[in-house]
Amino acid sequence: MTFETEQDLKREHKAITTFVNTFGGSFQKLDPYDIDYKVFDKAGKLIAYAEVKGRIRTMHNAYPLPVAARKAVKLVDKRLNPVMIWSCEDGIIYGKIDKLKGEIKWGGRPPRDNSSNDDELMIYYDKQKALKYVRFV
């Protein structure tokens, strides 16, 4: 089951658009139960897969950057330049997930309602050289 709101999808679209505009590429949304996007270069050649996570904070205050371990595994399983993108209020933070170092622990977001338990195995990334930043224009 997916819990993305219309606002989440707009934030995600803004982030992937900002990412591919940095090199003149394009993207294609994948199935809701897959990772988020295929990424193409200027010539239309598939060059990467990307997962976008919303981070409702500024880039400066976004750390540690969270992602569910199951999403990270699914992204890496694609085997072609797996890129994690965190969409912050003022821009994106991104990096190739196979170059990042994080801490794995049990966590997650606060429950969405009284009947759900949203805790799961999470990866938290602190600031590091492998992460890049692009401000929204």
Image: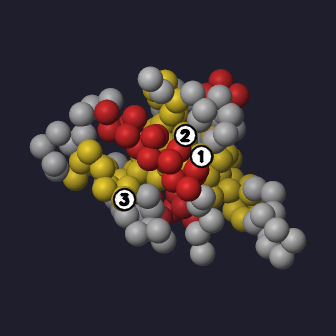
| Amino acid type, label 1 | Gly
| Amino acid type, label 2 | Ser
Q: Distance between the residues labelled 1 and 2?
A: 5 Å
Question: Which image quarter is the N terminus in?
Answer: bottom right
Residue 3, above or below 17: below
Q: Where is residue 27 in the image (x, y as percent from the top left)?
A: 30, 50
- First of labels 3, 1 by sequence position: 3
The residue wearing badge 1 is: 54
Mark 1 surroundings: few (<14), some (14-19) or many (≥20) residues within 10 A: some
Location of residue 106 by image quarter:
bottom right
Q: Between residues 37 and 75, which one lies in front from this camera angle? A: 37
Which residue appears at 37% of the width and 64% of the height? 30
| Amino acid type, label 3 | Lys
Tell me if I can see residue 98 in this picture.
no
Tag 1 and tag 2, C-beta contact below 8 Å: yes
The residue wearing badge 3 is: 29
Q: Position of residue 2 (x, y in %)?
A: 58, 69
Which residue appears at 47% of the width and 53% of the height? 51
Instruction: Determine whether the residue tagged by mark 3 lies in a helix, strand or loop.
Output: strand
The residue wearing badge 2 is: 87
- First of labels 1, 2 by sequence position: 1
Question: Which image quarter is the C terminus in?
Answer: top left
Q: Position of residue 101 (x, y in %)?
A: 57, 42
Instruction: Determine whether the residue tagged by mark 2 lies in a helix, strand or loop.
Output: strand
Mark 2 surroundings: few (<14), some (14-19) or many (≥20) residues within 10 A: many
